[in-house]
Amino acid sequence: MEFSIRSPSNIAFIKYWGQRNSSLVLPSNDSFSMNLSNCYTDITVERVEDPSVKEMIIKEFKTDEYTPATNAEMQKVLAYYDVAKKYLGVANDTGFRIRSANSFPKKAGIASSASFFSAMALAFTKIFGKDLDKKQLSILARLSGSGSACRSIPDGFSWWKASDNSEESYAESIEAPDYWDLRDIVLVLSFDEKKVSSAEGHQGAQTSRYFNIRQQALTSTLQETKNAFQMKDFTAFGTLIEQEAINFHSILMTQVPPLFFWSESTVRCIKEIVKLREDGLEGFFTIDAGENIHLICEGKNEAGFSEYFLKQEYVKEVIINSAAKGTHFL
Ligand code: DP6
């Protein structure tokens, strides 16, 4: 048995930061994201009868060759195999060979773990001979440890509900990809690997004295952002998600130990986006746990922004995304 899966990465407009339960990967708050059309992982999986065969090879962006996964990468896949086996209630072991390829540079600060583990959720379901609905598949993706992977399962724009109950914390599509002609223009400012993983970062979130204030404010922020989204009011929507990105980074900077991801280029880029906006080209930034910028704009302004940022020598790569469908078989 051999099959292929494509799964997108996603950008959160309202971020997941902090957990109610780390072993069950239950987030402190709801989050809301868009799947990315040009940042995805393709995996091809061969099911092997011999359970001792568990292999993975990886092809990096813009290379032609597949190379064996590192020990650390393999350990994560094997740990997730055990989680999936348990969640799916499977008794017998199985072997597999995986080929994985990303459509985007690995160290670009775009969550390759979200696209990879959402693809693996569907892959393990298939090799164990099970069939899950989208809700259960999203829960299984969440349990990979890369919680945001659960938002890559549904199509287009995803809403991940926070809950104390594992069966109630999953992502659902609130609109299809063609609902709104939005873009996420990823401005890669550095290919440096980040020193602290999100998994580690979540553990420290509650040490920020502003964490509870953020949590309280998020109830109305989430509602206002959803309203602006439903009304397709881009100015209101962009203003809210930009404020949210700054709010999220204030938590990072005030948790103990602090996480400070912004570089000189990040600040320069923020200022340029604000200036371009003042001059009439409307776009807003959001930033994940890294230094690269996600510039959110409407389709009509894509060319204006890409032409501008392609000319800036401090911008290493420009990746243009629209909203995309979720995890699916190829
Ligand atoms: C800042 O624990 O899902 O991107 O395993 O690296 O994908 P990875 O991270 P995860 O945390 C994501 C944190 C975030 C915000 C977000 O995507 O909601």
Image: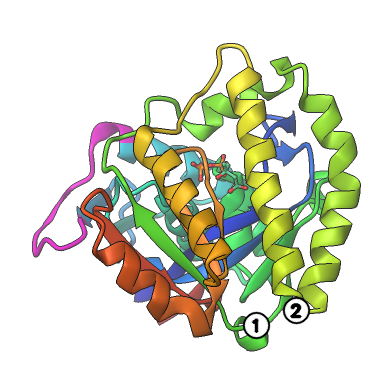
**Which residue is rendered at x = 86% and y = 60% of the image?**
224
Place of residue 80 in the rendered image (x, y in percent of width and height, measured from the top left): 49, 43
Crowdedness of circle 2 by 10 Å Cα count: few (<14), some, many (20+)? some
**What residue did someone put label 2 on?**
232
Q: Where's ligand 1: which quadrant?
A: top right
- Residue 116, position as x, y percentages in the image: 42, 56
Q: Nearer the viewer, residue 148 or 272?
A: 272
**Residue type marked 2:** Lys
Instruction: Examine the image and state in which quarter residue 158 appears.
Output: bottom right
Q: Name which of mark 1 and mark 2 comes first in the sequence.
A: 1
Region in magenta: 59-72
Compared with residue 180, is residue 207 higher up or lower down, i.e. above or below? above
Q: Nearer the viewer, residue 320 or 11?
A: 320
Q: Residue furthest front?
A: 279
Q: Is residue 317 left or right of residue 306?
A: left
Kind of residue indicated by mark 1: Trp
Q: Residues within 10 Å of mark 1 (few under 14, many from 20)?
A: some
Of badges 1 and 2, nearer the viewer stands 2
Identify the secondary structure beneath mark 2: loop
Q: Is residue 127 visible?
A: no
Residue at x-position 24% and y-position 64%: 311
Q: Is residue 52 visible?
A: yes
Could you tell me if the residues under marks 1 and 2 are in contact, i.e. CB atoms within 8 Å?
Answer: yes
Residue 211 quadrant: top right
Which residue is tagged 1? 180
Mark 1–mark 2 distance (CA, rounded to whole Å):
7 Å
Front residue of 281/295: it is 281
